[in-house]
Amino acid sequence: MRLAFSFYVWQKHFQPPNDASDECKFMRDRRFREFDTTWNTLLLLRRAYDHFRPFVDYISHVEFAGQTNIRASIAAMKNRYETWLSEMDAIAHAGRA
């Protein structure tokens, strides 16, 4: 999930047009393009997180119910993902404006 968020931000903000450097080739090799189409990365990440969140909630509330430190780490992780999705939404909307 973290690599996907990072790739999205790099692709929207830092990828030079017509890039040919080794660094850009490296980033492009983890692309979310297959089968001659470009995937809607933001939509896919949002859907993935929508299914990931209930699983993480279950783990937090059932498996680690009495472990405050682990539950706090899980909550922080969820907060990061939700922040990234919000930032990605803002980037997507800024590109349309």
Image (cartoon, rainbow, N blue to C red):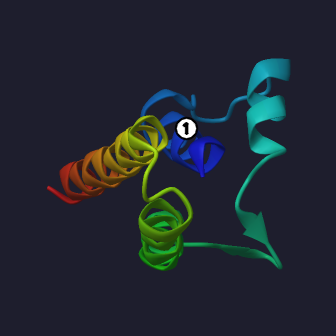
Please determine whether, in this image, residue 27 is positioned above or below residue 83: above
Query: Disc 1 on helix, strand or loop?
Result: helix
Residue beneath the point at 27% across and 57% down: 89
In-front residue for pair 54/85 = 54
Please determine whether, in this image, residue 58 is positioned above or below residue 96: below
Q: Amino acid at mark 1?
A: Ser
Q: Is residue 79 left or right of residue 62?
A: left
**Image quadrant where residue 73 sits:** top left
Position in image of residue 4 (x %, y %): 60, 50
Residue beneath the point at 34% across and 54% down: 85
Q: Residues within 10 Å of mark 1 (few under 14, many from 20)?
A: few
In-front residue for pair 75/47 = 75
Q: Is residue 22 left or right of residue 39?
A: right
Position in image of residue 21 (x %, y %): 80, 20
**Residue matched to label 1:** 6
In-front residue for pair 88/79 = 79
Residue beneath the point at 38% across and 41% down: 68
**Image quadrant where residue 87 sits:** top left
Please determine whether, in this image, residue 61 is positioned above or below residue 2: below
